[in-house]
Amino acid sequence: MAYGKPRGFGPWALIAALGVIATAVVMRSVGADWRTASRESAGIAPDPQMVKEAVVQIYAARAYAWRGAFGVHTWIAVKPTDAEHYTVYQVIGWRAVRGMEALMVDQRPADQRWFGAMPELLVDLRGPDVDEVIARVDKAARGYPHNGNYTVWPGPNSNSFVAHVAREVPELRLDLPPTAIGKDYLPNGDIVARAPSGTGWQVSLFGLLGVLAAEKEGLEINILGLTFGVNPLQLAVKLPIVGRIAPSPPVERPEYLASGNGRGS
């Protein structure tokens, strides 16, 4: 009896796997009420009452309801030296819908759950020169050119905002996850820009089609706002819906910005 050539998994198996993961995320959010969903601290950020040094952290968490199947919401939290609270910068869609500025800046825990979703730490920068970085983060955030606009897909949205700030403040060296839909939507209709990490470049057509090559991010291809990529230095694979697959998390320990913008562990 002759046997045919074994069939590989192929692209359909990958699509099916992504569909299963998306369904699982959606089902987890079914029935969740935004009014009662947890916004408690996840216990990741240092206690501002105990840690006196300046801190900049960036977080990502699955978006609320069905949107969480495909993407994350990102935000920036800062604490100047000796400050007793965090200031959080984030873009909120409903604010733009109601004719308000999309950017919200307020004092709250840096690592709040996003309507029940556990945040993931993407950047943890500390040290004597971080106060200067915080000032530049504030300037870049308040200069965000799409403060009156918000579009879930392909942007501009909360991830477009965080990517904009990161490009303006390359000391952050931010590697946004592939699930940060909107990160490749470039401000002011630009087609070419630095990668959010500041370690490479990207070409993007309105966030719908593009390519990125950078030391920090690796190689990424954006198709209809969905990111596929690899990072050989981190042994990481990047997939839409699933996110970043790697042997280590994006941040294993704080980075310290020493005098002269040098970095230490």
Image: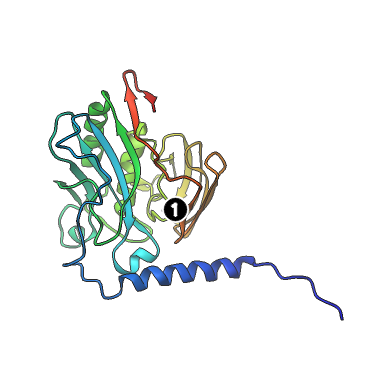
Residue at image position (18%, 58%) is 95
Residue type pointed to by label 1: Pro
The quadrant the C terminus occupies is top left
Residue at image position (15%, 47%) is 108
For the image, the number of numbered tags is: 1
Residue at image position (75%, 70%) is 6
Which residue in the protein does label 1 denote? 178
Please provide percent x and percent y for residue 121.
34, 46
Q: Nearer the viewer, residue 48 or 182?
A: 48
Q: Residue 5 lies in what quarter of the image?
A: bottom right
The quadrant the N terminus occupies is bottom right
Please provide percent x and percent y for residue 96.
20, 58
Residue at image position (50%, 36%) is 215
Label 1 CA crowd tier, 10 Å (few <14, some 14–19, many 20+):
many
Task: Please determine whether, in this image, residue 258 is positioned above or below residue 244.
Answer: above
Q: Residue furthest bottom?
A: 1
Task: Please determine whether, in this image, residue 205 is positioned above or below residue 133.
Answer: below
Q: In this view, does 132 lie to the left or right of 72?
A: left
